[in-house]
Amino acid sequence: MANIDVSVIIPLKDNKDQVSSVIKRLCTETEGLEIEFIVIDMNSADGGVLNTLNIIKSLNLRGCVVQSGGCSVSSALNTGIRRASGDYVTFVYPSRLYRDYITSYYRTAKEKNADFVFAVPETSDGNRILISDGVTGTDIIVSLIRSSLTMDFTAVMFRREYLISENISFYEDCFYGYAEAFIYNALLHRPKVAYLPLRLERIETPQDPKDEVKAAKNCFDRLDAMIKIYHLAKELHKNDEVLINAIEYQRLPWIIMNCVDKLLLEGFKQSSIKKLLKSKNYYKYLDFSKDTDSDLRVRVIIWKTVPWLYKP
């Protein structure tokens, strides 16, 4: 059997038509590569398992469907990593799809012998100057936090052996922001990075109207995950003040204030939100420094001193 170039890991949850369409499209887009499809089912009730197996069989593809129960997407993706056998892995989310990038990513990864590959838009000259040969994972984290670099966390590629050797996985208790935390985790472990000057083309897909409510309900998952990243950064890069300060005084307070905004828009009272933040011991992460973005600094100050005047 030929070696597998890329393992495509796809979560399946009552979206059989989307997953079938994704598999068929990727077969065309990755012609010439040895691909396997690892579809992780999370208790689908729409016949998605049988439908997906039939697609894989009828197209004579390498792949499987693994049932992981009613777990989080994070847990499902970790199951996919464990079952994958490709040199590289990528994650395809049926709700957030991009057109024709996997082959380009793989070729770049092989050419650069990279552990991690992502795209930077061709038209962003500043970003292309920033990303140069030898750039470190921590450089990228700081640039992402400061918004001098953009990255779509759902269109990346990793060397599978890198993830396994460094014991990098998704935080399974995280239901919101898990992709961002996973990538920050991987970048903290000093991967060899490569990028493409490529503008990803989004494929429009039907959106679940409950997504916004779900995002607001689980917004503190994202904060909990980033707190883990903060402590990991201090453990692995304790002398990197730029990195630590970027997470502590920019990313963490930004996420907290984003949660505050979502809860206010859902009708929660300021007093209830402050009580919640204090009960979860989040207030110690709501701080700022001279490096904090000025708009964020103002938001934090108003919220902490005169919350009744704060508007999202």
Image: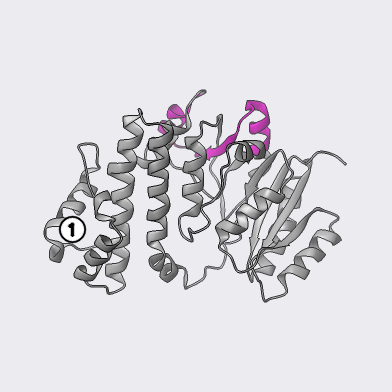
Q: Is residue 22 left or right of residue 254?
A: right
Is the image coloured rainbow, by chain, by secondary structure, or in one colour? one colour
Residue beneath the point at 24% across and 55% down: 283
Q: Quadrant of the C terminus?
A: bottom left
Q: Is residue 92 visible?
A: no
Q: Quadrant of the N terminus?
A: top right
Residue beneath the point at 61% across and 30% down: 114
Closer to us: 76 or 297: 76
Residue at the far top: name it.
134
**Residue 203 rendering spot, x and y as whole percentages:** 58, 57
**In which image quadrant can residue 124 be found?**
top left
Q: Is residue 111 magenta?
A: yes
**Depicted 113 relative to depicted 186: above or below:** above
Q: Is residue 3 left or right of residue 247?
A: right
Closer to us: 188 or 158: 188
* Residue type indicated by callout 1: Trp
Q: Is residue 179 magenta?
A: no
**Residue 79 rendering spot, x and y as whole percentages:** 65, 54
**In which image quadrant can residue 69 be found?**
bottom right
Task: Look at the numbered disc 1 and give the secondary structure of its residue.
Answer: helix
**In which image quadrant can residue 12 be found?**
bottom right
**Residue 269 rendering spot, x and y as whole percentages:** 22, 72
**Residue 100 rendering spot, x and y as whole percentages:** 65, 47
Residue beneath the point at 49% across and 54% down: 178
Q: Which residue is mark 1?
A: 303
Q: What segment is highlighted magenta in the picture?
A: 105-132
Residue beneath the point at 61% across and 41% down: 157
